[in-house]
Image (cartoon, rainbow, N blue to C red):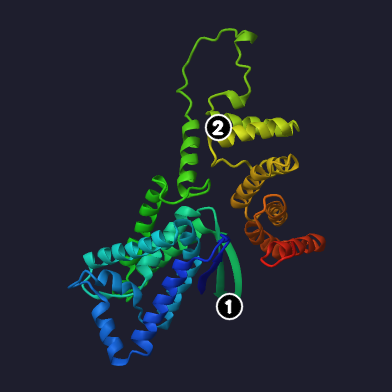
């Protein structure tokens, strides 16, 4: 059985130049050392692997660009392409390269601390990139190629794929189950060091805002979880007390949304109440207040869509696309997502004058829409939005 990630639902808006450069560098160095280099190439390879018994400082960097064979190289580059593009775009090219190299150095240090044999390969650095992806896009989904008697593809949450399959199964459980795993040629300790580095440093970069924040990154999810835990206060111990009549005016007649809630939680509850009463104008006003207090908030699926639609009807275009994009980020597989992408593309192109932002939404909408008329509208607008389109 073979399960291989082949893509994610995170769409990049520009060429991840640094990630492409790293992939090209790895491929060229492999060709130089293993394919065309002959004896000289093997000499270079021998002196640039990380020798854990007698490590030299420069080897902590050079070992990251060497690979054992074609399969080793291709496997690593697939993972780097799939998870690295989005991380590169979020971090920026320069920071991404430093993060990649630092992850590889940390992995090498962890490996050398407990081994005496040489190590080579980009796996440690790519492990750091993989958990950095999880920190930045924890609610994204990963497409997997599944090969077992038959061939199919499945889509699963990134959290499950990276934590349970990539880290826990591939690097801890499977090696422990297989006899002789301790003598395997795979440097599992380097992988685990890279995963730890990517998780810890990725969270730190979010905390100090070294990378742009979003309402769906790991730090935002942890923050919302802690707020929910705080609100879920356990009731006090029950006491036996003498019964006495309760006067009606002693009862707390406040709505549930106003009892023991933070300002943001109270606004969320009030928005849902107003939507249930079909008071869209007041719901939008409350939503605006909530976003001013906490821009990371997102409502339940239908409520978020209703608010975005109302903002669009009011021609509050910047706010409407922000609400629609929050919907798409939180609910990328919703049945409404293709139509929402079409709407966002139309608003960007027709009202905000941002055709480059429109193109990415329109392309995906055209590929996903099932109604011929909607697909035709997406394609027509895409022709106008793409460079060289009609004015």
Q: Residue furthest bottom?
A: 38
Q: Nearer the viewer, residue 369 or 248?
A: 369
Residue 346: image quadrant is bottom right
Q: Position of residue 136 (x, y in %)?
A: 47, 53
The answer to which of marks 2 and 1 sits earlier in the sequence is 1
Residue 310 versus residue 65 in the image, above or below: above
**Would you say 12 lies left or right of 177 here?**
right
Q: Closer to the camera: disc 2 or disc 1?
A: 2
Secondary structure state at the residue bearing disc 2: helix
Asked if one can make out residue 160 in the rendered structure from this viewpoint, the answer is: yes
- Give the total number of marks visible in the rendering: 2
Whether residue 276 sits left or right of residue 191 in the image: it is right
Where's residue 102, x and y in %? 32, 62
Numbered circle sitting on residue 328: none
Inter-mark Cα distance, 2 to 1: 51 Å
Q: Position of residue 111 (x, y in %)?
A: 27, 67
Q: Which residue is mark 1?
A: 149
Compared with 238, 175 (above or below) is: below
Q: Are marks 2 and 1 in contact (CB under 8 Å)?
A: no
Residue 205 vertical position relative to residue 165 in the rendered view, above or below = above
Task: Report helix, strand or loop for mark 1.
Answer: loop
Q: Would residue 268 be visible to someone looking at this image?
A: no
Query: Mark on residue 264?
Result: 2
At x 45%, y 23%, the residue is 237
Viewer-side residue, 245 vs 294 = 294
């Amino acid at each position: 059985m073979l399960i291989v990630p082949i893509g994610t639902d995170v769409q990049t808006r520009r060429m991840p130049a640094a990630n492409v450069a790293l992939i090209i560098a790895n491929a060229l160095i492999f060709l130089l050392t293993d394919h065309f280099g002959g004896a000289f190439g093997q000499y270079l390879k021998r002196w640039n692997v990380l020798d854990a018994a007698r490590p030299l400082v420069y080897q902590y960097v050079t070992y990251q660009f060497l690979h054992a064979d074609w399969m080793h190289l291709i496997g690593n580059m697939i993972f780097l392409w799939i998870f690295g593009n989005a991380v590169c775009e979020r971090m920026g090219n320069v920071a991404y390269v430093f993060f990649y190299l630092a992850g590889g150095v940390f992995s090498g240090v962890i490996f050398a601390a407990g081994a005496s044999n040489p190590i080579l390969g980009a796996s440690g650095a790519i492990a750091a990139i993989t958990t950095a992806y999880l920190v930045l896009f924890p609610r994204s989904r990963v497409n997997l190629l599944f090969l077992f008697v038959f061939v199919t593809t499945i889509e699963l949450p990134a959290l499950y794929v990276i934590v349970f399959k990539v880290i826990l199964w591939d690097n801890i459980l499977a090696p422990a189950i297989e006899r002789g795993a301790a003598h395997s040629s795979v440097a599992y300790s380097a992988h685990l060091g890279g995963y730890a580095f990517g998780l810890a440093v990725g969270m730190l970069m979010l905390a100090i805002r070294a990378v742009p924040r979003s309402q769906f990154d790991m730090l935002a999810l942890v923050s919302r979880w802690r707020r929910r835990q705080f609100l879920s206060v356990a009731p006090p111990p029950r006491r036996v007390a003498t019964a006495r009549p309760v006067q009606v005016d002693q009862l707390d007649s406040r709505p549930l949304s106003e009892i023991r809630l933070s300002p943001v939680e109270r606004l969320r509850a009030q928005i849902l109440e107003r939507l249930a009463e079909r008071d869209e104008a007041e719901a939008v006003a409350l939503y605006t207040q909530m976003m001013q207090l906490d821009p990371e908030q997102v409502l339940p699926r239908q409520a978020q869509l209703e608010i975005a639609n109302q903002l669009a009807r009011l021609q509050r275009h910047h706010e409407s696309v922000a609400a629609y994009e929050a919907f798409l980020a939180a609910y990328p597989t919703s049945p409404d997502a293709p139509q929402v992408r079409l709407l966002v593309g139309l608003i960007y192109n027709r009202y905000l004058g941002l055709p480059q932002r429109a193109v990415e939404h329109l392309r995906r909408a055209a590929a996903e829409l099932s109604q011929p008329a909607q697909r035709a509208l997406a394609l027509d607008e895409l022709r106008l939005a793409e460079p060289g389109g009609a004015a």
